[in-house]
Amino acid sequence: MRVARYHKKGPPEVLQVEDIATPEPAEGEALVRVEATGVTYADVLRRGEGYYPVQPKLPHIPGNLAVAMVEAVGPGGDAGLVGQRVLANVFTGAYAEQGLAKIATFRKIPDGVDPIDALAIFSEAETAGLAVRAAGKLQPGETVFVPAATGGVGFLVVQFARLWGAKRVFGAASTPEKRAVVESLGAIPIDYTIDGWSKEVIEKNEGRGVDLAFEVTGGPVFYETFNAVRPGGRVVNYGNVTDTDSPINPRQLLRKNQALIGFYRGAGAADNLFVEERAQLYKDLDVMLAKGELKAAIGKTFTLDQAADAHRALEGRASPGKVILLPNG
């Protein structure tokens, strides 16, 4: 089978397409054919020299969550799964034509949902939904600010906030085209390439800061986001795509009675956190998808041979929405 992997860290071109043996599923596992997987900032940071809490063992095939077709099951497995389209955690790496996944991780893709749409929504829905509901504890009638609102997670954060009762949602983006996308979601677009953009958020929010904000960029955006939040408000930090340290003085939090909340989905799952919230989220997702309430943030799609180009597109922020790899496309 063909895979895209790297033997050393470095720029996007370290990703090379190679042929390796197709793995055999063990008990509790299945061999799946990967139809679509997302390219994430975690993939970029782990491939490069940036900080990431869990470092890969080399050579490394990136990717984990994928929409895939079950091709075979391991000893004792349910043969009825073969031919089903599922959302799966491909632990051998999803930048591959095929891979192995634990059957216990499968989530059946609802009938009639396009694989690419399903990937764009499901790959980020858990992070976005838990950030809003479990970490941010959004209350109906609150106001919300989402920097990076056209990214894969931010796109869904905006939608979840609106569906779960936010009075007003602001979404920041860097280009007119991306701000048009924000507006199409029913949010108020903010240009955060302008100095002091937090003042625009406050002006458009009836002269006061928002109740809740979500921060993933780091650096100057991190600090400006705090300026857009009211005294007593909350900021959920769920990443740092610029890999920039953003130290904060606890006295700043004290002076404005603000709360900084860290959220990392992977660690939350490993620590067995948010179990009830996660179960409820997936029930809600089924309803939302059936009603057509969620839009998929599909950016550019790439083939396996274009894996390096996919990383360049994500690093250069050249594509609003989810960057998607189609290993068999």
Image (tube, grey):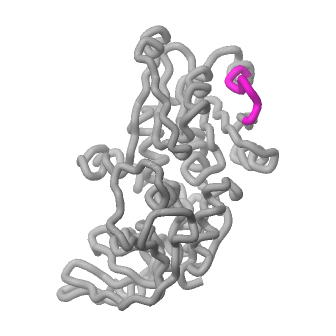
- In the figure, is residue 75 to the left or right of 250? left
- In the figure, is residue 50 to the left or right of 142? left
Q: How far across and down, in percent of the image, does residue 87 sit?
A: 42, 70
Q: Nearer the viewer, residue 118 or 172?
A: 172
Q: Nearer the viewer, residue 298 or 55?
A: 55
- In the figure, is residue 284 to the left or right of 78? right
Depicted 218 relative to depicted 299: above or below: above
**Which contiguous range is marked in magenta?**
193-199
Q: Quadrant of the C terminus?
A: bottom right
**Residue reaching furthest to the right:** 176
Which residue: 55% across, 74% down? 115
Residue 286 visible from this viewpoint: no
Depicted 131 relative to depicted 52: above or below: above
Which residue: 67% across, 66% down? 300
Asked if residue 305 lies in the magenta stretch, the reply is no
Q: How far across and down, in percent of the image, does residue 35 sit?
A: 51, 79
Which quadrant would residue 98 be assigned to in this image? bottom left
Q: How far across and down, in percent of the image, does residue 63 sit?
A: 44, 68
Residue 151 visible from this viewpoint: yes
**Residue reaching furthest to the top:** 255
- In the figure, is residue 283 to the left or right of 315? left
Q: Nearer the viewer, residue 239 or 156?
A: 239
Q: Quadrant of the N terminus?
A: bottom left
